[in-house]
Image (cartoon, rainbow, N blue to C red):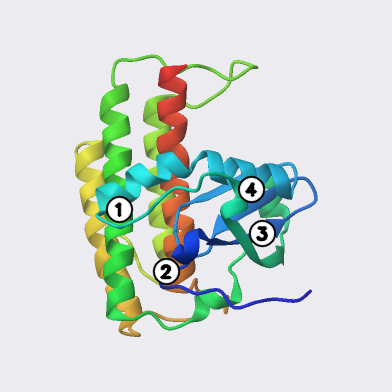
Amino acid sequence: MEKQAIKGDGMSQQNNTIDVYIETGEKKVFAVAADWPGWSRSGSDEASALQALADYGPRYAQIMKRAGLDFSPPAGVEAFRVVERLEGGSGTDFGVPGVAPPADTQPVSEDDLRRFELIMRACWEAFAGAIAAAQGRELRKGPRGGGRDLEKIARHVLDAGRAYLKQLGWTPGPGDAPDVQAEIDLLRQEEVEAMAAKVRGELPEQGPRGGARWPLRYYVRRAAWHVLDHVWEIEDRVQG
């Protein structure tokens, strides 16, 4: 399968074109913005995934505005340029954009790091805001009556945040703060320290059993996606 290089500097919106890559599983497909961590949506096929990505552009723009970054949502799927197609796996079909593109192994500059910090801070602020806005309100259930309650969503996202830090090579604290906001604050501080340590080469590249740790670019891509996925879940279930 032919692959093209993906830029990592956030500049792919020049000429109103947004670079995306496609991750294809047997049952599900993800469209992922190459230079905009967290902006990733899925569908049953490539066309529906790209449409979902376009549909969520305005919502992602709100997060980037919070981050202080210049981002213009696309008018439609015609703004996307597919630069790479990756073979997904069981994680893809489970609902996770789980394949790191080769470009995610590129070195991370200090400017890149600062940009990643801004994006992650904005994502966590949006998550804290969504939790606060949903307090005391019932979340709409799914068609079969399922769906986590607010407390379980918060716990899931925080636990995943610590697990993701481990994948980066960082050993996170226990996360025993007195409330959700305090726990988010602690996790955010660890995340900032972990990302900086990764750039300095202070974290191991291999796990204790030999598995490769995540590169920083993929960590930010995956972590931002997960937080925003649940921000939007909370917003939709409250509004519904």
> In 3D space, how far apart are the residues under numbered discs 3 and 4 (Cα atoms)?
9 Å
Q: State if disc 2 and disc 1 touch (CB < 8 Å).
A: no
Q: Can residue 236 be seen here? A: yes
Numbered label attached to residue 50? 4
Percent coordinates x, y for residue 87 in the rendering: 74, 64
| Label 3 sits on residue | 22
Percent coordinates x, y for residue 68 in the rendering: 24, 55
Q: Residues within 10 Å of mark 4 (few under 14, many from 20)?
A: many
Q: Can residue 98 be seen here? A: no
> In 3D space, how far apart are the residues under numbered discs 1 and 2 (Cα atoms)?
38 Å
Residue type (three-letter) at the residue carrying disc 1: Pro
Instruction: Specify the quadrant that holds the N terminus.
Output: bottom right
> In 3D space, how far apart are the residues under numbered discs 2 and 4 (Cα atoms)?
19 Å
Of circles 4 and 1, which is in front?
4
N-terminal label among 2 and 3: 2
Placement of 167 over or under 31, stated as above or below: below
Residue type (three-letter) at the residue carrying disc 4: Leu
N-terminal label among 4 and 1: 4
N-terminal label among 2 and 4: 2
- Residue 83 lies left or right of residue 46; in this view the side is left
Placement of 115 over or under 178, stated as above or below: below
Q: Residue at x 69, y 76 (%)?
A: 3
Q: Residue at x 47, y 16 (%)?
A: 240
| Label 1 sits on residue | 174
Numbered label attached to residue 11? 2
